[in-house]
Amino acid sequence: MAWLQLELETNQTQAEELSELLEQFGAVSVSLVASSDEPLFDTQGQDEDPSEGNNNNKLWQKTRVIALLHPDSDLDILLVCLRDRIGGDNIYQHKIELLKDKDWVGEFKAEHQPLYFSDRVCISPSWCDQSENTIPTLVLDPGLAFGTGAHPTTSLCIEWLAENDLTNKVVIDYGCGSGILAMVAALLGAKEVYAVDIDKQALQAARDNIDRNKLAEIIVVDHVDNITLPVADILIANILMNPLKELLEKFSELTRPEGDIILSGLLHVQAEECLETYNACFNMGEPVFNSEWTRLHGIKK
C-alpha cells in the first residue's frame, strides 16, 4: 500500500501542537526534523517535566513536521483545518509526496549501523550482531535523548576520548544527554564517571542506557543540582556556547590543575569567542572541525 507524506515547515512554538493535531487527524506517524541550523540544546526550561508541554525551547527555530497518512486522506481539508487551528502564518510551506510501501523498520535499521572510533570503541544499535566484534562495544539505540555517536558534536568528543589514555581517570560528563560520553569514558578505563544533566528525560535515558551496558558501578547519574561533583581529571561538555561561557568558573573549579577540558556543541564560527573565554583558566589548543561543528580542548592552568 502506498502512503501520503505531508511535510510542513513551522516554528518551534507551534511544532508540538501541529504534531498533536496531525495525530488527532489520523497520521500513522509524525516526526520532527531540523529546518534551521542551530543544535537541539538549550538551558532554559530543561528541568521542566516533558509531560507539562513546555518543551518548545527544545525544538529548532524552524522545524519540519513530517506526517505519514493513509492514501485516502483528504489533504486539502486537512491543511485548511491545520491552518485554522494554529494560524496560516505559522505554516511557512508544505509539501505532499506519494510514497510507495516499503519496509520502514528495515530501512530505519539499515540507516543506523555500528560506528567505530580509533579501533578502540564501537557504538552499536541493538539489532546489529556484535558477537564477532573484538572492540569494546556500547549498545545504544537511537532515541529521544541526544547522543548516539552519529552527530559531529558527539563523534568529535568520542574521538578525543578514544585517542587518549583514560585509565583510572575521574571524568565528568556535563550535560550527559543519553549518557554516551560517560559510557565511552567508563568503557575506556575511567575509574569514576559522573554523568549530570538538568533534563529529567535525558537523565532517565542515561540511566537506562548505563544499566543496559552494565556500567552502573562506574557511572553516577544525577541532576546537576542534586550532586556534589569531585574535581575531575577530565571534564567534557557537549552543550551550547552561551551555557559554556556561563559555566567557565564552575568548570575551572571542577577540573584539577593540568586536567583536560573538552568542549563541543559549538559551530565553527563560535570557536574563537569560546576560546577567548576559556583562555582565562585553561591553555586552549587549536579547534578541531567536523563539518560546521567544532571541538575545543584545553589544559587547566
Image (cartoon, helix red, strand yellow):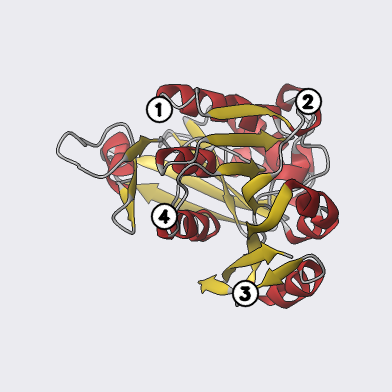
Q: Which residue is mark 1?
A: 213
Q: Which residue is mark 3?
A: 285
Q: Which residue is mark 4?
A: 162
- The reply to whether dot 1 and dot 2 touch (C-beta < 8 Å) is no
Where is residue 291? Give x, y as percent: 51, 72
Q: Residue at x 61, y 49 (%)?
A: 233
As drawn, which residue projects farthest toward the left? 132
Say few, some or many: other residues with alpha carbon within 10 Å of mark 4 (under 14 / 14 to 19 / 20 or more).
Answer: some
N-terminal of the pair, mark 1 or mark 2, is 1
Q: Residue at x 79, y 65 (%)?
A: 281
Q: Which residue is mark 2?
A: 226
Q: Is residue 81 in view?
A: no
For numbered disc 1, what is the local secondary structure?
A: loop
Q: Give the spatial CA distance, label 3 vs label 2.
A: 32 Å
N-terminal of the pair, mark 4 or mark 1, is 4
Q: Residue at x 70, y 71 (%)?
A: 283
Q: Nearer the viewer, residue 128 or 2?
A: 128
Q: Give the spatial CA distance, label 1 vs label 3.
A: 33 Å
- The reply to whether dot 1 and dot 3 touch (C-beta < 8 Å) is no
Q: Give the spatial CA distance, label 1 vs label 2.
A: 24 Å
Say few, some or many: other residues with alpha carbon within 10 Å of mark 2 (under 14 / 14 to 19 / 20 or more).
Answer: few
